[in-house]
Amino acid sequence: MDGKVKKQKQHQQKHSGPKAEKKKLKKQNGSTEEDERKRNPKAFAVQSAVRMAKTFHRAQDIKTKKHHVPVVDRTPLEPPPIVIVVVGPPKVGKSTLIRCLIKNFTRQKLTDICGPVTIVSGKKRRLTFMECNNDINSMIDLAKVADLVLMLIDASFGFEMETFEFLNICQVHGFPRIMGVLTHLDAFKNNKTLRKTKKNLKHRFWTEVYQGAKLFYLSGMVYGEYQNQEVKNLGRFISVMKFRPLVWQTSHPYILADRIEDLTDPERLRTDPKCDRTVSLYGYLRGTHLKNKGQVHIPGVGDFQMSDVNFLPDPCPLPGTQKKRALNEKERLLYAPMAGVGGVVYDKDAVYIDLPANHVKQLQEEVRPTTELVQSLIETHVTLDAKMAASKVSLFSGSAGLDTTDISEQSGVQEGLREIHVWDAHTQTQRRKVVFTGLEEDDVSGSSSDEDDDGSDQENQEEEDDLSTFLKEVRDKSEKATKGSTPPVKKRKLEEMKGEEEVIAEAPAFADSEDELERGEADSEGEGEAERAGDSGHCSKESEEDSDDEEDGDEDDESMEEEIGADDSDEEEEQGTFKWKEGLQQKASAAFLRHQEAAPNLRKLVYGSVVEAEDSEEEEEELGGLFRVNRPQKSKKVQADALDCSHFNPDISHNWELEEMLNSIRDCFVTGQWEEGQDAATLLKEDEELYGDFEDLETGKVHKGMTGEQDQAEKSESDEDETDDEDQQVKMDDEEVQKNKRLEKKRRLKERFDTEYDDGDATYFDDLKEEMQKQAELNRAEFEDMDDESRVQYEGFRPGMYVRLEISSLPCEFVTNFDPHYPVIIGGLGTSEGNVGYLQMRLKKHRWYERILKTRDPLILSLGWRRFQTIPLYHIEDHNGRHRLLKYTPQHMHCGASIWGPITPQGTGFLAVQSVSGVKANFRIAATGVVLDLDKSVTIVKKLKLIGYPYKIFQNTCFIKGMFNTVLEVAKFEGASIRTVSGVRGQIKKALSTPPGAFRATFEDRLLMSDIVFLRSWYPVSIPQLYNPVTSLLLPVGQKDSWSGMRTVGQLKHDLGVRNKPSIDSLYKPITRAPRHFNPLHIPKELQKALPFKSKPKLLQPKGKVPRDLKRASVIREPHERKVAELLRALSTVHHYKKKVAQRAHHAKHKEFLQQKEKDEEAKMKRMKDARKKLYRIMGQKDQKKQRSSLKGTPQDD
């Protein structure tokens, strides 16, 4: 091989053959399906009506399943960047994926991913990437603002608990689009295992999200990055994905802050480091419109009032509208201030500068800062003290420059100040006298300085010339250098200001060099504005407007003089005679201005003058491109004698000499063309044709209509050709107008006919979508023509704007403990969402959470934008409408919950966790639910049993004590039903005087003194008022996931080592029951007679004692008798043993006999079976012989 790579063979399309012919026919005739239908209609006919109906129904079901309730499209024309949240457990590759996606879209590398990273991914789409760390607070917050979730899963390990927790959070707060990404696939060495794992993970992911959810596979890493093709495919999916608007996001404005600035006064910080801070937060506005001075909530910090909101230029703008297939290098923008990347941003807090990564090589070769001052310092060839010695400063434009000698003299005076202590005898105090050491030297050298004035002037002039030429060279170089490196924001502003600079040629107040200042003064003097040139630039806005008007008026006068000079001398003489006509335009414009000033502008009267962004930027003059000149005289607040802002001054009076201005109002007059077909010439001609001759009835004079020929005769000969052409043109126009009218009429009739008789394929769903589309277009067109400043005052800041929020009372810990890895979300609140009250909810314990939830145990809820701790009361509704308090949440069942918390709209979902500190091994989401009601209409009651004891019993009435304490309590419960433990029901009747609390009650049956009476009652429970926001963002860096609020009773006892003291009544004790003696059963004699004999009591005599003589005597044996008995017992034992052995042998012998008998039987059966087979065979053979003989026939011998 000589190093050359073998080139692959290119694919050649076939130009002949059956395939090529088929393709040619298809291109020529289009689809051949219609021809096939015509040629063989039976092949396309319906074979089965039932199958056709099923197919049709299935197609309709699939079509209908795709329908969703149409929502009015409120997305702005320039939508905000799409928020993409990258979620996953630790060490799964989140940061690597974000870096690869950013590199794919912008060709730039980011080393550290901090905070939101905004990029331009296409012509109409921007993306904001945000990494979600392993903290449940961040997971909850980002799930509320995410448009797309990239869920990373470690395929070598499987699903982890964080994945399921985030999915459940998303289900509660509105499900965004979710895409799974499998990483660590290179850990599998066996392809079969890899395929099986992919399939299992995919189906489990589909179970959790939805069937067919997209799951990407990142097969491996190359040099610490994922493979380019896989990342590119993922980026393509992200770029074309469509998003469904979520209810909470579309009804609330919110901002994902990408930049934070502390605006607190440094002096205040020095005196009180822990004072509340004034902070400005920056980010793209999303959701709905944001009103100024509204209330917002920052999750993890709290509720705040916005002190100011304004919009800024977009730091990451979309590319131009020209049609092209891809973005060029300059349009691949990346903006991530928290990660140290972004464009140039100018606002009143800071100037933010970024050097793009794609120009790093160029910057390394030639480092050129973007500011003029720094460039001039870099390119200088003279030392700084030499330049300072030769420099001059002019404090005011047009004033004499201050030399270094003057400054040194003044500084010498200042340096020579010293004090001496003098004792004053009158006041009896020591006074400090100031001594000026430079006074004597000035007096002495005064004459010599006067003498040297002439020579020094010449030297100074030479120095000034040298200095001006040197500064001019420096400025020219800096201008060349800054041509390619001007910040994009400044470029845009310079282009906008170019038009105004052409009109107003104002001398720069602080020029880079004196020759520039002189050039500005010379230009202004040439235009006849010496007064403006001498001004130091401290003029008010009104005076600038007046000067603009004067300049415009002067230009108009000059143009008029040129036109007058071009006319003939006869016209000049006539103009000289009519002196009163001079200056008519100036007089008319002055009168018009006075009239406009007299009529107030209502919008400006209400809202005040709207200062445009461009004006404010023009007023802020920059010195050397870096420092701003503070002009308090220009500010609106200083102008005490300024004009009323409600009076409107027009910018310029119209020049009616121009043909364009005349044409713009030509159709406003009678002779103009008002509408199509209503031209004045055409209408006059129609009148002449219709009303040719008429007679004046008063005078009797006959007027004849003028025909075209008479008109031509009256006109001069020179105009004959022109009039012929005009008449022909009028006729042609008339015919064309009539033809257009007829066509328009036909079209309208056709449309009316179609709408009446043709229903078409339009369905109700299509009509609904069309209606929503019209509403969206109407919403967009309402404020489309207004500028942003005015539009913001009417509708608020619209989504898609890059806004700056200023909040004046943030806790100092938010700034000191700020961590860019945690999201800062500013969520706008509705009118009543800032209040706190009672909320009724429906709640269900999560089936994966191990423990049941107990009433009055503190619980952390995520509701709306907020995360807060509260004490819920769980209850369930009985069949009679009573809300009964529950001690614990039921298993696999919903229950009600009442809390004290922030007012949130009904139907808002929420989730509950018991703790947000640390990482638990088990599932952390305790419960989920939805808000039902926003008041205290539900009364929760709990069961209360009151116990009493009878102390007097009269038949079915008894007196009971111990249940109540006072007569008043008894009176409250009169008529209540009571019951005994044995089940006898009763009712409270009346209170007794003594003892207090005793009452009379009646029962169904007679009570016993041992009975216990109880009353079942319901007691209302009050809801605890606890609302404790989770302030996790105020914790120190590294401890933001360790927020702990109120502890449960069980946690307190565990931490403090407190053991429960059991109730004495609850302890198990031995039961000692006294024996009860029952009276004998007494049956009356009459009843005994009626009873059958079996039931009659038997009167038997009790058996007496057996006399001694009848008792059996005990026998005592003799020794000989005992020996005989023992011998007999031994013999009987031997006999029994022998008998058992004989029986055992007999059984074994019998068993063998039975086995032998069974064998004999089997042999006998076999012999009989064989004999039967033999017999059947012989009989079958005989039958076959008979059949054969019968077929052959009888022999002849017979």
Image (cartoon, rainbow, N blue to C red):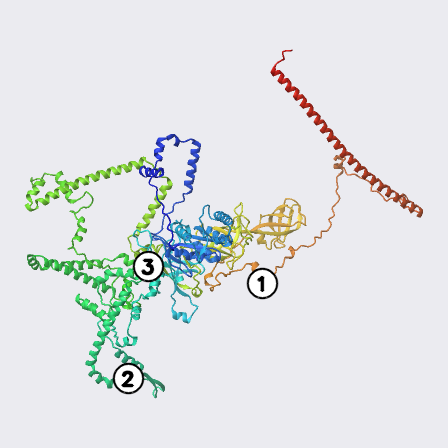
Tag 3–tag 1 contact (CB < 8 Å): no
Mark nearer the viewer, 2 or 1 = 2
Q: Which mark is residue 313?
A: 3
Where 525 falls versus 1066 (above or below)?
below
**Left or right of 693 on screen, residue 143:** right
Q: Residue at x 19, y 41 (%)?
A: 737
Q: Amino acid at mark 1?
A: Leu
**Left or right of 275 on screen, residue 1126:** right
Find disc 1 in the rendering and name its residue. 1056
Point out the tag, 3 or 1, that comes first from the N-terminus: 3
Tag 3–tag 2 contact (CB < 8 Å): no
What whole-number distance in Å separates the C-alpha atoms at marks 3 and 2? 55 Å
Q: Which x, y percent locates residue 489?
A: 31, 61
Q: Residue at x 40, y 62 (%)?
A: 339
Q: Which x, y percent locates residue 845?
A: 52, 51
Find disc 2 in the rendering and name its residue. 438
The image quadrant of residue 1109 is: top right
Q: Quadrant of the N terminus?
A: bottom left
